[in-house]
Amino acid sequence: MEVSQRLLKFKFPILFTSILVLLVSCLFILAPRFLTIIAYFWPLLLSTALFLVAVLVFARASPPGTESSGDKTGEGLLDYVACEPEPQPDLDPEPELEPELEPEPAPALEQIPAGESLKSE
């Protein structure tokens, strides 16, 4: 009696563990073999490995970049992407503005009293 009470106390952990064991065993039984997966993806794996080797070779062969302006790497690109144009020195001096002439007042139109028409009868 005492054993069954202890089992009821741990029924959820036992149930969880048994479901987990069942799922893992089904995965191993139903999943394809490792060599089958390697045989299917070998071109992708080979091209990725060759690309990484090429990156390492070019990284060691190229000299480290030195910027004379002292900017951080990529700061110019970030400014370009953020649409913050760099200040450019003005090559053309600003043209002198001509003094503006005051416009002549337009001729006044005769005011027609309300209720009268423009047609003469």
Image (cartoon, helix red, strand yellow):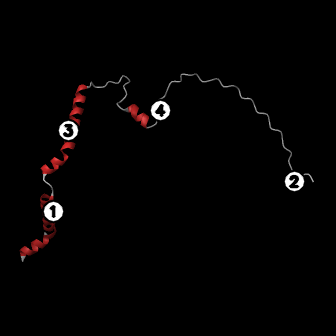
**Which sits earlier in the primary sequence, circle 1 or circle 4?**
1
> Does the CB distance between marks 1 and 4 fall below 8 Å?
no
**Which sits earlier in the primary sequence, circle 3 or circle 1?**
1
Residue 1: percent from left, percent from top = 6, 77
From the image, state whether disc 3 or disc 1 is nearer to you.
Answer: 3
Q: CA distance from mark 2 to mark 1?
A: 96 Å
What residue is shown with label 1? 23
Q: CA distance from mark 1 to mark 4?
A: 59 Å
From the image, state whether disc 4 or disc 3 is nearer to you.
Answer: 3
Please give left or right for residue 34 compared with residue 95 in the image: left
What mark, if any, has residue 117 been given in the picture?
2
Residue 62: percent from left, percent from top = 26, 25
Residue 94: percent from left, percent from top = 60, 24
> Does the CB distance between marks 4 and 2 fall below 8 Å?
no
Number of other residues with Cα within 10 Å of mark 3, as a class: few under 14, some 14 to 19, many 20 or more: few
**Which sits earlier in the primary sequence, circle 4 or circle 2?**
4
Number of other residues with Cα within 10 Å of mark 4, as a class: few under 14, some 14 to 19, many 20 or more: few
